[in-house]
């Protein structure tokens, strides 16, 4: 593959962790030495065949990779256009793509001699994946979760506790994912020698955006091979939802240099972009600095961070990974959005037509597919990342479907 | 070094003591009270003001200063408002150095060039920007050094090894020694560890070393200040403001309470002579 061609979109970040103007290492001095150590350690394992052999082992035998690439015939027929393939990462152990990254980082933490792990979580999927890896590798696990999310996502809190993690409800700020990340960083500052911080998305200080992307890129690599096998060609388009953006970048990255593949990242439009109640950092935000990186943020004129809103707790974040911000600036990826309402409709539709209950997050991706696929030819092919399953969302979604007569 | 900072350190040195730096958040709990508090700090004997520019997500701060930031934002405080408070302070108090502390995002949003120009026009003396480590600080440091604003670098317990010369190389004004690995207002460091850190820093840099984080009592302030060139007290002051705000005390009474505590700190530092 042309990994290093001069016009490649795959050479980022630079040595300072920059993707164009985005990325970087905007952290307190206390954390700088730690982040530099993570960077050095990651550089070492990147070229270490033993590390990759171990990662591959757990991907295959523990996560259940490769995940299938499934031709969704009934949805294709319903949308009435291009052929829709679903990359079934909701079939992974723990029910989402998050575990791909967590296993990689947990192996790195072990290699660095760390015995204690910190993680932030919003919907709880990254928290559950981290608690799972910590049980597997015998590591202590401290999860930080906004107090509001602890209430909204009780089943995941219960799972984490059963797996042996300590769940710390965060009441600072607005008690949601951004505050959980603040608190995880504060905890790390206070425990620099013993702890490793497993960030769950392609954001945070360098090298996290790069490292998480690399661990998630298994999604796109597999999908590319699988589609060649099924159709003998590249897809015409890719669609994935974006909160911080790890499942999307995992699917997109291996295709970035395939110029004929059109790529759509779907942000959460909440109650609508114009309502101000959304989580669409690229569509409705401006560049700024938060959680260790420069990237597009939801903020006011004074540079104060504004709360995100989305029905999906996993997309409810006022920032986005810096590589997405760069891909947006240079126009390689098209960033679009879908509302709460549109996601709800697809949540039900996909359950009824495919027997797959999607998480609310990929329901946003389906909502865009519902608009885009009918505009395409029947010979064209689209891959959508089914990055998580919807069991966790039933409590929130069922009353809403009932209200709308969709049950 | 800024003239006011230099004069302040010189005066303290002549009196054989360290300086007392006091942190408050601009606009906490409101502009009027905040202005009165600043006046009272000077009257009570503070040698340097560290004025916090509120940010919604203060990653390096503990609960007390987080709450101060949010109170200020809630009362309508902005970066522009913080600079106005600084400017009014400077009209009344021509000699006391005032250093701005904050996070990069509000500055970036305001415009880095515009910020440096306005901060200088407001008569401030230095900048402490917590989330701009040496690897990232050039975009603000270069501009501020070209004006008369000292870009103050932080040294932490995790910096004291190989990294120390690198961080100290382009430091200006004074060195802020963060005495604990942690956030503001939580644990306190052992005096021996502060002493050893200050000595390590002084072997590499000629700049004054001022210690902060976890200094809560007059006695601690006096000891810590004597180990280097000064001590900064933040959370303990801000907690008094929080208490007064919770009790709905008037601006005057709030300022008086803050002043009483600050005077205890200043007196203890003056009375404590290096062993």
Image: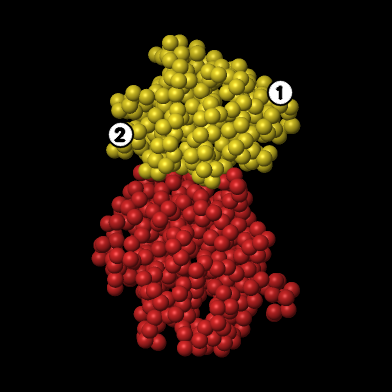
Specify whether residue A163 is in view: no
Q: What residue do we see at 44% from left, 24% from top?
A: B2
Task: Give the structural element (helix, strand or loop) at label 1.
Answer: helix
Colour in which the image shows chain A: red
Q: CA distance from mark 2 to mark 1?
A: 46 Å
Task: Identify the mark nearer the N-term, 2 or 1.
Answer: 2
| Residue A41 appears left or right of A84 | left
Say which residue appears at 54% left-offset and 29% top-offset.
B121
Q: Which residue is mark 2?
A: B165
**Looking at the image, residue B203 lies above or below residue B44:** below
Q: Is residue A214 above or below residue B164?
A: below
The structure residue drawn at horizontal position 29% and vertical position 71%, both measured from the top left corner, is A2
Q: Quadrant of residue B274?
A: top left
User: Residue B188's x, y, as percent?
Assistant: 48, 31
Crowding at dot 2, Cα within 10 Å, few <14 / some 14-19 / many 20+, comes out as some
Q: Which numbered circle lies on residue B121?
A: none
**Callout 2 secondary element:** helix
Q: Quadrant of residue B18?
A: top left
Which quadrant holds the N terminus of chain B?
top left
- Against A320, residue B99 (above or below) is above
Q: Which chain is yellow?
A: B
**Residue A337 in which image quadrant:** bottom right
Is residue A341 shown left or right of residue B151?
right
């Amino acid at each position: 593959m042309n990994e290093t061609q001069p016009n490649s979109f795959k050479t980022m970040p630079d040595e300072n962790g920059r993707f164009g103007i985005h990325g970087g290492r905007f952290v307190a001095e206390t954390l700088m030495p730690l982040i530099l150590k993570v960077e050095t350690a990651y550089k070492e394992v990147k070229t270490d065949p033993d590390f990759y052999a171990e990662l591959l082992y757990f991907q295959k035998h523990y996560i259940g990779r490769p995940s299938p690439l499934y031709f969704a015939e009934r949805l294709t027929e319903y949308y009435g256009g291009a052929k829709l393939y679903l990359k079934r990462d909701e079939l992974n152990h723990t029910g989402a793509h998050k575990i791909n990254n967590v296993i990689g980082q947990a192996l790195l933490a072990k290699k660095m001699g760390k015995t204690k792990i910190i993680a932030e979580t919003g919907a709880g999927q990254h928290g559950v994946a981290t608690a799972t890896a910590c049980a597997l590798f015998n590591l202590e696990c401290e999860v930080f979760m906004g107090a509001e999310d602890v209430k909204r996502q009780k089943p995941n809190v219960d799972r984490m506790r059963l797996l042996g993690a300590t769940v710390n409800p965060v009441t600072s700020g607005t008690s949601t994912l951004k505050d959980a990340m603040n608190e995880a960083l504060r905890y790390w500052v206070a425990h620099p020698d013993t702890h490793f911080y497993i960030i769950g998305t392609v954001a945070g200080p360098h090298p996290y955006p790069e490292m998480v992307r690399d661990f998630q890129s298994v999604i796109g690599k597999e999908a590319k091979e699988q589609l060649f096998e099924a159709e003998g060609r590249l897809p015409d388009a890719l669609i994935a939802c974006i909160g911080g953006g790890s499942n999307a970048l995992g699917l997109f990255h291996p295709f970035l240099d395939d110029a004929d593949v059109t790529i759509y990242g779907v942000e959460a439009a909440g109650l609508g972009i114009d309502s101000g109640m959304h989580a669409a950092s690229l569509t409705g935000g401006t560049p700024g600095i938060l959680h260790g990186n420069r990237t597009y943020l939801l903020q006011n004129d004074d540079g104060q961070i504004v709360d995100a809103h989305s029905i999906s707790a996993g997309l409810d974040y006022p920032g986005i990974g810096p590589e997405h911000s760069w891909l947006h600036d240079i126009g390689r990826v098209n960033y679009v959005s879908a509302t709460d309402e549109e996601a709800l409709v697809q949540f039900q539709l996909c359950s009824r037509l495919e027997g797959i209950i999607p998480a609310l997050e990929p329901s946003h991706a389906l909502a865009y597919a519902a608009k885009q696929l009918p505009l395409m030819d029947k010979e064209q092919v689209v891959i959508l990342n089914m990055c998580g399953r919807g069991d966790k969302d039933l409590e929130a979604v069922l009353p809403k479907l009932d209200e709308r007569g969709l049950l | 070094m800024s003239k006011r900072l230099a004069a302040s350190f010189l005066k303290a040195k002549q009196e054989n003591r360290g300086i007392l730096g006091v942190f408050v958040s601009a606009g906490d709990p409101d502009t009027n009270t905040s202005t009165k508090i600043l006046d009272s700090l000077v009257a009570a004997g503070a040698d340097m003001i560290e004025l916090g520019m509120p940010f919604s997500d203060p990653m390096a701060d503990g609960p007390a200063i987080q709450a101060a930031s949010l109170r200020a934002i809630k009362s309508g405080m902005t970066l522009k408002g913080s600079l106005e408070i600084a400017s009014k302070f400077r009209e009344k108090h021509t000699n006391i150095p005032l250093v701005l502390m904050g996070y990069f995002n509000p500055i970036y949003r305001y415009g880095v060039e515009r910020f440096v120009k306005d901060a200088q026009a407001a008569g401030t003396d230095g900048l402490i920007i917590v989330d701009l480590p040496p690897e990232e600080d050039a975009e603000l440091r270069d501009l501020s050094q070209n004006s008369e604003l000292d870009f103050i670098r932080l040294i932490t317990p995790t910096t004291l090894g190989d990294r120390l010369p690198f961080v100290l190389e382009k430091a200006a004004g004074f060195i802020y020694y963060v005495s604990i690995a942690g956030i503001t207002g939580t644990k306190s460091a052992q005096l021996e560890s502060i002493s050893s850190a200050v000595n390590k820093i002084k072997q590499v840099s000629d700049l004054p070393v001022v210690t902060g984080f976890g200094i809560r009592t007059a006695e601690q302030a006096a000891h810590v200040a004597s180990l280097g060139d000064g001590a900064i007290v933040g959370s303990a002051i801000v907690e008094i403001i929080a208490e007064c705000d919770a009790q709905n005390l008037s601006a005057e009474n709030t300022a008086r309470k803050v002043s009483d505590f600050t005077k205890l700190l200043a007196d203890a530092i003056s009375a404590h002579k290096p062993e």
